[in-house]
Each structure stands twice: as C-alpha cells, then as structure tokens.
Image (cartoon, rainbow, N blue to C red):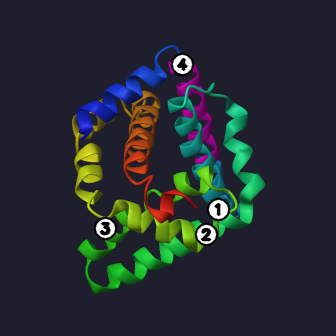
Amino acid sequence: MMYAKDFRASARTALSGSWGSAVLVTFLMMVISALGSLVLAGIVVMPVISWSFSIIFLAALRRKKIEAQGLFVGFNYFGKIWAMSALSFLFVFFWSLLLVIPGIIKAFSYSMAPYILADHPNMKALDAITASRAMMHGNKWRLFCLQLSFFGWALLACLTFGIGELWLIPYMETATASFYEDIKNKASSQEYAAV
C-alpha cells in the first residue's frame, strides 16, 4: 500500500525536469481563474479549465510533456465536464445541508471523477461520479492524509505571499494523480475500472 510520502515522491519524480513548465501552467491557471471570477462566463468556463489543469498533471505523471495548451483540452468534452462538475457540486451541497462533515466526505467520494472521465471520455458524467464513489470506498481517509501532508507546505506558500503556490499546486495535483493511479490499479478487477 502506498502512503502520502510515496505519492509525494512519485509527484517529485514526475515533475523533475518539468518544474518550469508546471509553474508556467499554474501561473496561467491562476490568471485565467482570476479573470474568470470577474465575469459571469467564468462560472461556465472554470470547471472545464480546472479539469484540464488536473489532467495536465495526470499526463505528467504518465511521462507526458506539460504544455500550456493543455489547459484548453477540456473544451473537447465541455458538456460532460460541466455536467460532472455541476452534479458533484449539487450532491456535495445537498449532503452539506445535513451537516458539513457529510458534505466533505462526499466531496472526497467524488474527487476521482475528473480522472476517471479523462481515462474514459465516452463515460457519462453521472457514471464517472458513481465510479469515483465506488473507487474511493475505503480510500477517503488515505486521500485526506495525503492532502493533510501538504499543510506545512501550504503554510510556507502563505509566507511567500502566494508565490510558493506556483510550485505547491503542481506538486499537490501530481501527488493526487499518483493517488488516483494507485487506487485505479488496485481496482482494475472491479467493473468501474474496466468501463
């Protein structure tokens, strides 16, 4: 079983030699996100850009080159990505109405849906969410521990007035992609991994 330190090590290995590209893509993502927050169109566009951003680092983990134009690859799947994001948001929102904790748990449950959709672009949005929920069964605590392991780095990034986030965000994204690869490989005999 891989642990947080293993996912971080995998991320560092995947990003070695590509940190410049990773920082550039992260900077562009931040600029697009800031501009998107200024206009109503950002609400429509940002889920697609965010999905593309995550997939860039999944591709980096798979030894593919990090390129800025990758931020726009999600527009090829605009409807599915937007539907997946909207459904995930609604499900988490309704679970959060009960209490905050169930909403957080469900957010972890649905967190692998973007990666599943990247690996299976013909899958329906709701099916990707369902597959993520099944894949994350028994793995939510591991993902929580992985994200918590970046807490110190996040504090350091704050001390640099956010500049450190240009390195931290790709590191976290790639480690999360490594987590996905690990649980996907363990689930390969399951129906949701073979779709």
Pick the quarter of the image with the C terminus: bottom right
Secondary element under disc 3, as helix, strand or loop, is: helix
Spatial CA distance of label 3 from label 1 is: 21 Å
Closer-to-camera residue (179/167)? 179
Residue at 58% in and 35% down? 59
Residue at 70% in and 51% down? 74
Q: Amino acid at mark 2?
A: Ala
Secondary element under disc 4, as helix, strand or loop, is: loop
Q: Is there a contact, CB below 8 Å, between mark 2 and mark 1?
A: yes
Spatial CA distance of label 2 from label 3 is: 20 Å
- Point out the residue furthest to the front here: 189
Q: Nearer the viewer, mark 4 or mark 2?
A: 2
Q: Amino acid at mark 1?
A: Ile
- Point out the residue furthest to the top here: 17
Secondary element under disc 1, as helix, strand or loop, is: helix
Write down the residue under mark 1: 81
Residue 133 seen in this snapshot: yes
- Point out the residue furthest to the right here: 76
Write down the residue under mark 3: 104
Horizontal relation, residue 148 to residue 60: left or right: left
Horizontal relation, residue 30 to residue 112: left or right: right
Mark positioned earlier in the residue sequence (3 or 1) = 1
Q: Identify the mark at residue 18; answer none if there is no mark.
A: 4
Q: Identify the mark at residue 152; answer none if there is no mark.
A: none
Q: Which region of the structure is painted magenta?
A: 18-33
